[in-house]
């Protein structure tokens, strides 16, 4: 019989605070089984995005629901966050982060009256999340729809970013006749704020002009969107992903048919947030700002970053300890998987350098909300990848808005549920590739799941 769990506050709190048991396979010299090794559970928080006007748009708000890691791996457990989850304050899809141990959720509301408000919650099981600390607004610094991320510094710091642009012309024409003006360049002004996640305090804010090369700017290129700040291993530089856009220099009008340049990242000093420079990849092309999920991670002293919109399919790029792209590292997802037009939607590595990647490709069916998604297991060290076949796929399995994976040792948790249909939590053991089908995720019409935290 399937067990339905609606409130875990008591049961799962006990699971978290007490030690579980593992079976020991050896005996001591007296032939007596030794005491079993203790193992500790952690919270797994599932995020669900309700439909707004259209299936899969996620604009109807975000709900979260937590269960223990043991329950998350149990296919007889069934949860229904859309019916009894905790509503996260956000006008549209919330931008969520979690502490490394899963005990705390962090949220910055996206758009609406509460847009830009930072709150954090203690995870207590089921729909029980208790707000802790002070609510603080970063909207005066980065607007009411900020792009933000939690830095991997022991859950201490978050960072939010924005960029504003202004096309610049010389003054050949009259003020009433801008068509006679000559396009010069586009000024891109970047704002970066840092947030103390422990004490709910804004700790830094700087605005800087971010320039491309003279040739690139003369040809109409400029940085139009930034996201996903990542702290380097030394803790003295922040890497910020960038998307380029272009105008036609002859007219000053937007240009959508242009050559895609090498992928770029903004590098600035940390924690001062000063002295930005732009580095360019000679391997990957297209954007590095990602979308809803963290797009770059520090591993083994370097930073590995996915790119999107690459004419040759998404790559995983490497930024070395010298704060420059390492073009000797070539990892094409197209080549590794034997596919065409790979587009990395979200990804997350474990500490062993093996990662789960959510992607779409040329074979993706067109579902009710967009292109069909898939998962692959990749190895950053060997630059190899394999599609995870033990997870079911169908046309409505939409991953464009996917946000969160949970890493627990060498295991990576994820959600699988097509738009408007039930699905499950799955757990990938990255060392072996083994996949465990876990708890059922009950869905509602037009809605979808956007990950675990």
Image (cartoon, rainbow, N blue to C red):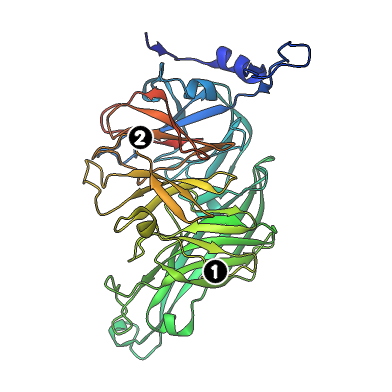
Outermost residue on the top side: it is 1
Q: Is residue 138 visible?
A: no
429 on left or right of 396: right
Q: Is residue 280 visible?
A: yes
What residue does disc 2 label?
391
What is the quadrant of residue 246 in the picture? bottom left
Residue 205 position within the rendered picture, expressed as x and y whole percent measured from the top left: 63, 58
What is the quadrant of residue 171 in the picture? bottom left
Tell me the number on the disc at residue 44. Answer: none
Q: Does dot 1 land on a helix, a strand or a loop? A: loop
Residue 293 position within the rendered picture, expressed as x and y whole percent measured from the top left: 46, 47
Tell me which numbered mark, 1 or 2, is placed earlier along the sequence: 1
What is the quadrant of residue 447 in the picture? top left
Of 91 and 392, nearer the camera is 392
309 on left or right of 96: left
363 on left or right of 153: left
What residue does disc 1 label?
325
Q: Does dot 2 land on a helix, a strand or a loop? A: loop
Q: Nearer the viewer, mark 1 or mark 2?
A: 2
Reply above or below: 43 against 91. above
Q: Quadrant of the N terminus?
A: top left
Answer yes or no: do the residues labelled 1 and 2 have beta carbons within 8 Å? no
């Amino acid at each position: 019989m399937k067990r339905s769990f609606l409130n875990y506050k008591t049961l799962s709190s006990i699971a978290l605070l007490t030690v579980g048991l593992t079976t020991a396979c050896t005996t001591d010299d007296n032939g007596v089984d030794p005491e079993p090794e203790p193992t500790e559970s952690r919270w797994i928080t599932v995020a669900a995005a309700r439909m707004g006007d259209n299936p899969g748009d996620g604009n109807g708000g975000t709900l979260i629901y937590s269960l223990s890691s043991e329950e998350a791996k149990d296919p007889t457990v069934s949860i229904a966050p859309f019916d009894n989850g905790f509503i996260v304050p956000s006008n549209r899809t919330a931008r969520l982060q979690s502490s490394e141990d899963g005990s705390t959720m962090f949220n910055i509301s996206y758009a609406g009256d509460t847009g830009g408000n930072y709150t954090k919650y203690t995870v207590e099981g089921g729909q029980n999340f208790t707000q802790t600390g002070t609510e603080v607004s970063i909207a005066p610094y980065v607007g009411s729809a900020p792009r933000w991320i939690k830095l991997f510094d022991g859950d201490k710091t978050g960072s939010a970013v924005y960029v504003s642009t202004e096309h610049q012309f010389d003054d050949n024409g009259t003020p009433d006749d801008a068509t006679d003006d000559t396009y010069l360049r586009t000024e891109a002004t970047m704002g970066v704020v840092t947030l103390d996640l422990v004490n709910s305090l804004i700790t830094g804010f700087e605005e800087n002009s971010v320039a491309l090369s003279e040739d690139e700017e003369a040809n109409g290129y400029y940085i139009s969107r930034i996201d996903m700040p990542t702290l380097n291993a030394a803790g003295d530089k922040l890497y910020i992903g960038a998307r380029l856009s272009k105008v036609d220099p002859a007219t000053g009008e937007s240009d959508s048919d242009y050559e895609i340049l090498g992928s770029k990242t903004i590098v600035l000093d940390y924690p001062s947030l000063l002295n930005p420079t732009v580095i360019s990849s000679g391997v990957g092309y297209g954007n590095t700002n990602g979308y809803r999920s963290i797009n770059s991670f520090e591993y083994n002293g370097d930073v590995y970053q996915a790119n999107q919109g690459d004419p040759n399919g998404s790559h995983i790029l490497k930024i070395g300890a010298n704060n420059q792209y390492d073009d000797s590292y070539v990892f094409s997802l197209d080549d590794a998987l034997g596919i065409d037009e790979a587009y990395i939607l979200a990804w997350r590595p474990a500490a062993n350098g093996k990662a789960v990647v959510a992607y779409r490709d040329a074979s993706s069916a067109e579902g009710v909300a967009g292109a069909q998604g898939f998962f692959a297991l990749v190895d950053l060290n060997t630059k190899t990848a394999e599609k995870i076949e033990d997870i079911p796929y169908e046309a409505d399995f939409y991953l464009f808005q996917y946000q969160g994976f949970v890493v627990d040792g060498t295991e990576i948790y994820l959600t699988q549920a097509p738009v408007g249909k039930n699905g499950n939590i799955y757990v990938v053991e990255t060392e072996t590739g083994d996949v465990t089908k876990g708890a059922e995720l009950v869905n509602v019409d037009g809605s979808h799941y956007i990950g675990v935290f």
